[in-house]
Image (cartoon, helix red, strand yellow):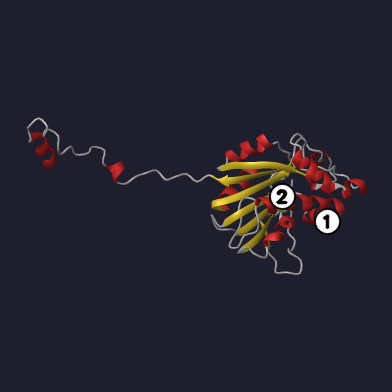
Amino acid sequence: MHLDVLDLRNFYYRTALGRVAQRAIREQMVKLWPPAPGHTVAGFGFAVPLLRPYLEQSRRVVGLMPGPQGVMPWPAAMENVAVLCEEMHWPLPTGLVDRLVLLHGLETSENPSAVLEEASRVLGPGGRALFIVPNRIGLWSRRDVTPFGFGRPYSVAQLEAQLKRHSFTPERSQSVLFAPPSTARFWLRTADFWESVGRRVPWLAGGVLMVEASKQVYAPTRGGLRAAVTRPLRVLEGVSNGSPEPAMNQLRK
């Protein structure tokens, strides 16, 4: 079940904990994907808090928000790039997107397979997708004071297996949000410290998983002459034993 767009907006833009989450996730996303000119960048779910760094240089930026969630204008005081869409029908041409991020779009969907099919369809050759979901063993998925406490949490193995079933190749994964999902002043003020510690300690579980994946593009089956010539002519057959008849018979056929 999707969360309401107003609840998501209030969390990310009007609470200190939401701004901590937004900053931590966006910083890691920008490290993975530095803004580049000419790219088409799209987000599905409620990914717009992560897209602002790409507004200036990208060819286009699109925020796709599913109907059950609702839509809001974004970005503020600029030309709107957010659009309401169906989970199974995104208003984007096939192969248009270079960078696609899903935040609060997969774990809350009632039909995640359809979401992944659309993600695969709109992603172009050489494109990359970033799937951001609650970590099943993290603290953030165990408390419903944040949006990550709703929907289906994942482990890395579960998410990667689901991606492979929909023509994605997982490339790399990491976790973020190592500070507890607490509104206490101490944890909010030290959130950046815990993020830096968590990235250096591999066994520490972050609250959110980020899995980057590429789209599988299969080479076309070779046809043409190789497929058509199933019985090649052996025009020199018989020459070695001094008899030209086999070769002449092949040419007459």
Q: CA distance from mark 2 to mark 1?
A: 22 Å
Q: In the rendered view, tell whether residue 201 sits above or below residue 90.
A: above
For marks 2 and 1, the one nearer the N-term is: 1
Residue 162 in the image: state x and y as whole percent.
62, 38
Q: Is residue 40 above or below residue 28?
A: below
Secondary structure beneath label 2: helix
- Which residue is found at the position 10% from the left and 37% from the top? 249
Task: Inspect this view and state whether residue 12 appears.
Answer: yes
Tag 1: amino acid: Asn
Please indicate whether residue 111 sits to the left or right of residue 25 in the image.
left
Q: Is residue 249 above or below residue 48?
A: above
**Residue at 14% across / 37% down in the picture?**
236
Q: Position of residue 1 (x, y in %)?
A: 74, 45
Of circles 2 and 1, the one toward us is 2
In the picture of the structure, the residue carrying the numbered disc 2 is 28
- The foreground one among 83 and 187 is 187
Task: Pick the residue in front: 253 or 31.
Answer: 31
Q: Secondary structure at mark 1?
A: helix
Q: What x and y, as percent, mark residue 173?
A: 67, 41
Check residue 10 in the rendering and tell me which mark sits there, or answer none.
Answer: 1
Q: Quadrant of residue 140?
A: top right
Q: Nearer the viewer, residue 211 or 145?
A: 211
Residue that lies at the very extreme toward the top in this rendered image: 241
Residue 220 location in percent, x, y?
A: 42, 45
